[in-house]
Amino acid sequence: MPIPEDVTGEEVDKDVRQELLSLPKTLADDVARNLVMVARLLDEDPEQAYGYSRVALRLASRVPSVREAAGFAAYAVAKYGEALAEFRAARRMTGSVELWPVMADCERGLGRPEKALAMAGEPEVQKLDRAGQVEMRLVAAGARQDMGQSDAAVVTLQSPELASNSVQPWTARLRYAYADALLQVGREDEAREWFAKALEADQGGTTNASDRLAELDGVEFTDVLEDADEDEDTETDADELKDEAVTEAPAAADAAPSDDAPREDTPRDGRPEQS
């Protein structure tokens, strides 16, 4: 797949670069450049990112960072079985537990929330850092909702991290998930409060908390560009009808009978006269 000339492969972090040292230099550079493209496109064009990840995987399937990148690219395009296989492979190679929450979420994606919930209770969770444990809590709450256990999802999300006033990278998503869980069980006033708290912490725009707040307040947004397009279409249709009318008028005049032309007399009821 084409790679821009400004992508050198040097952009990968030092841990990935260290893993690639096991490869011949030319091959390592090719793999690194494809990994850079995966990282660049993962959010804005996941299908393209997936394509680059498959190239890297064909070139260096025994490199843990390659398997991890392939897993996230597959996850982004909802290929959950494939993603899970790649994450498992990366974990076997490194022994790390950091992928445990996303592996559990893949189980949810595969329609196995019970398995995801079981993973939330495994010893691996205790080895996760604080951010990883928050991610695991989010996955567990989602699994509860998948199973129709909305009240349990609310309880699952209640934690010291949720109660903290400190804003961390995961704070907005945790508060948003809690607000959504409250809304699911009919606690609308509390949900509104937590959507507001999520918006307050969402400095990077990772949630649509503002839209959810507006929805709860009964505010409807109008797409100005869409309305303009509709007005333009209406004007175009009117112009076309006008042109058709002008075109058909002479033809209608030609088709009309003259006063000198012979014609049958037709009574008012629309039937020809009987002879």
Image (tube, rainbow, N blue to C red):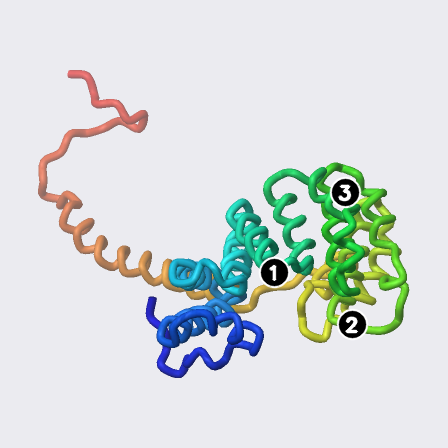
The C terminus, quarter of image = top left
- Compared to residue 92, the image places residue 63 above or below, namely below
Residue tagged 1: 94
Residue at 50%, 80% (x, y): give it: 11
Drawn side of residue 167 relative to residue 11, left or right: right
* Secondary structure category for the residue under label 2: loop
The reply to whether discs 1 and 3 touch (Cβ–Cβ < 8 Å) is no
Residue at 32%, 25% (x, y): give it: 269
- Compared to residue 83, the image places residue 176 above or below, namely below
The reply to whether discs 2 and 1 touch (Cβ–Cβ < 8 Å) is no
> Residue 211, percent across and down?
70, 62
The foreground one among 70 and 179 is 70
The disc labelled 2 sits on which kind of residue? Gln
Residue tagged 3: 144
Residue at 67%, 48% (x, y): give it: 104
Mark 3 or mark 2: which comes first in sequence? 3
Residue tagged 2: 168
Mark 2 or mark 1: which comes first in sequence? 1
